[in-house]
Image (cartoon, rainbow, N blue to C red):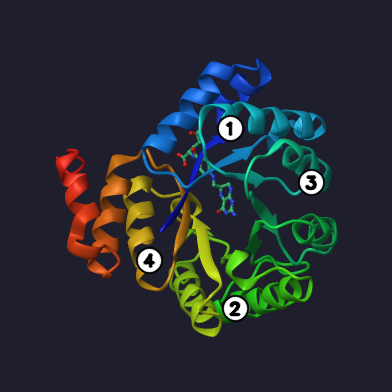
Amino acid sequence: MIIVGEKINTSRKAIAEAVENRDTEYIQEVARAQADAGADYIDVNAGTFLKREAAFLTWLVETVQAAVDLPLCLDSPDPKALESALGCHRGEAMINSISLEEDRWEALLPVVSARPCKVIALCMARTSMPTTAQERIDVAVELIEGLQAAGVALENIYVDPLVQPVSVDVRMGPAILDAIAGIRERFPTVNAICGLSNVSYGLPSRKMINRHFLVLAMQRGLNAAILDPTDREMRASLLTARMLLGKDEFCSDYIEGYQQGLYA
Ligand code: THG
């Protein structure tokens, strides 16, 4: 499982304040905590600042990579902000995200094909959001084939089935899960990633829903997730599911989690 730590996002009040005040220490503390909890990438998002997004995203890249030796997941639809942030990024970034929306596709395709990088392909159709599994798979196929035609390697593509709340339509759960399975069946070397928190929007006990959804999605082939790696119960569920799916040789990561007191 590839874990993208989601916490450095200006939709969160404390992060927006820290970015506004250029609070290096606080941002680096949140980055380190996620790295220590096992993040493979740190997501950075300054999307709430609009006009100042490029400057803030670039500052976040410098600030986070000064504290942790990890590649980042650059969470922006703006090619100018991405180019600026990539200019100071060390290593191979993940770009979050391209989709079939015409403006977005045209703006981001040059960014992702100009360099070796990972790219999240979000299952948004040209003018609408997919609802069924088949609609998601159709969008994914078009995204994958378009990226491949532009020279992006299949193993660098992370398809995001677009997680929507089950409180809006209870059929959303199986639609997302079936889409993950269908995409990975058709393209075994393409990765499947998603954010978890949208699934529980509008319901109580959201964290419990999110971690059960993670386990179900892993069973269907999810191999990357955008989540809070410092959430102990989430981490415990992830390690347990990984072991039960045969991905933890000698159960060693599971046992290490126990020894670290993660299940107490
Ligand atoms: N797919 C892709 N990118 C994404 C998402 C996705 N980026 C944004 C989002 N979804 C994932 N990132 C976050 C970041 C923070 C929080 C949730 C998702 C978060 N949420 C708190 C909560 O849910 O309770 C509330 C905010 C707060 O703490 O103030 O922290 O799906 N490709």
Location of mark 1 (residue): 65
Location of mark 4 (residue): 218
Q: Could you classify mark 1 by the number of other residues whose Cα lies within 10 Å: few (under 14), some (14-19), or many (20 or more)?
A: some
Side of 98 relative to 79 (left or right): left
Report the disc number at residue 78: 3
Give x and y (percent) for residue 49. Answer: 74, 31
Tag 4 secondary structure: helix
Find residue 100 and report its image quarter.
bottom right
Whether label 3 lies within 8 Å of ligand 1 gets the answer no
Q: Are marks 2 and 1 in contact (CB under 8 Å)?
A: no
- Mark nearer the N terminus (2 vs 4): 2
Mark nearer the viewer, 3 or 1? 1
- Mark nearer the N terminus (4 vs 1): 1
- Mark nearer the N terminus (3 vs 1): 1
**Nearer-the-camera pick, 139 or 174:** 139
Cα gap from disc 3 to disc 1, whole angstroms: 21 Å
